[in-house]
Image (tube, rainbow, N blue to C red):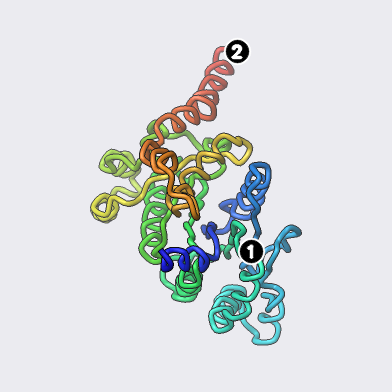
Amino acid sequence: MEAQMDGRRSLLGFGQAVIGPPGSGKTTYVRAMHALLTSMGRQASIINLDPAGEEEPGAAVSLRELLGLGEVMSELRLGPNGALLYCMEYLQSNLDWLRAKLESLRGTYFLFDCPGQVELYTHHPALPQILRCLGEWGLRLCAVHLVDSHYCTDPAKYISVLCTSLGTMLHIELPHINILSKMDLIEQYGRLAFNLDYYTEVMDLSYLVDHLTADPFFKRHRRLHEKLAEVIEDYGLVTFIPLSIKDEQSLRKVLAAVDKASGFCFGEDQRSLGNLMSVAVGADFHFTSTLAFQEKYVEQEKRTVEEQTLDL
């Protein structure tokens, strides 16, 4: 019993490491999630680990307090990519600074707004090591990986997103949630070849390969695409939750999935049957929410096109 109580006292808190490529909506997501948590009465703190992004007014901690991308570029004569990697390596070497900042916020829910350089999530060791240290300090994190949903409209880009998502999951080594962001804009750059649940649940990719190789430009690379699809399906790890930041209900569904992945829904110092049952009942398959997005953002667009055609 004493060991269990010591473990609870040493718990720094729960949180999300929000990651993803540039332009995927990480900072917007962090702000919206912070507002949602605050409205639910859950105290949350934004930790800005992006030395290149805009200054977050509501951030409790910012990496810019330690060093900024601009000064690194000018003093070391590095380009933006090299300077960003240097910043993360510098943070890795000065984790005592970050630990002191987080200790002062013990017990709050942490939202880490991470940089948008893909290399950090696929093969560079700095960020995974930083996140690993956070876990050793008693912080239970879930990685929230955002990708722009409009990539689903291009089969080649969608396969690329699947490969990146899988590589990120294997490299980061945290409980992991993949998000298709900007769902309200999903068909802005083209029509979906299949229903939305095909993309969120990553169903039989052979259909996508057939659709892709119908294009003469990609036909000669069919064998490559088949092998990439086999790797993704063999691992069987990648699925997505659709998200429109304007839709609070979809944001709540993401939070529920994150709380389950990180263990927050079990309670920090409660082990009630109600908490356990809420986890057992919560299904991993998000068909209902995906169907709602299909009707709201995809079917509506189709109806609009049909009405315009009839008018002509």
Regarding residue 258, the answer to whether it shows in the image is no
Regarding residue 227, the answer to whether it shows in the image is yes
Identify the residue shown where x is 61% and y is 75%: 98
Q: Which residue is mark 1?
A: 47
Give 123 or 310, whichever is nearer the viewer.
123
Give 183 or 267, whichever is nearer the viewer.
267
Identify the residue shown where x is 65% and y is 85%: 77
**Of helix, strand and loop, which one carries label 2?**
helix
Question: In the image, residue 204 lies at what x, y percent?
Answer: 27, 40
Mark 1 or mark 2: whose residue is earlier in sequence: 1
Residue 311: numbered disc: 2
Residue type (three-letter) at the residue carrying disc 2: Asp
Residue 176, quarter of the rendered image: bottom left
Question: In the image, residue 8 lies at what x, y percent?
Answer: 49, 63
From this viewpoint, which residue is outermost toward the top? 310
Residue type (three-letter) at the residue carrying disc 1: Ile
Residue 80, quarter of the rendered image: bottom right
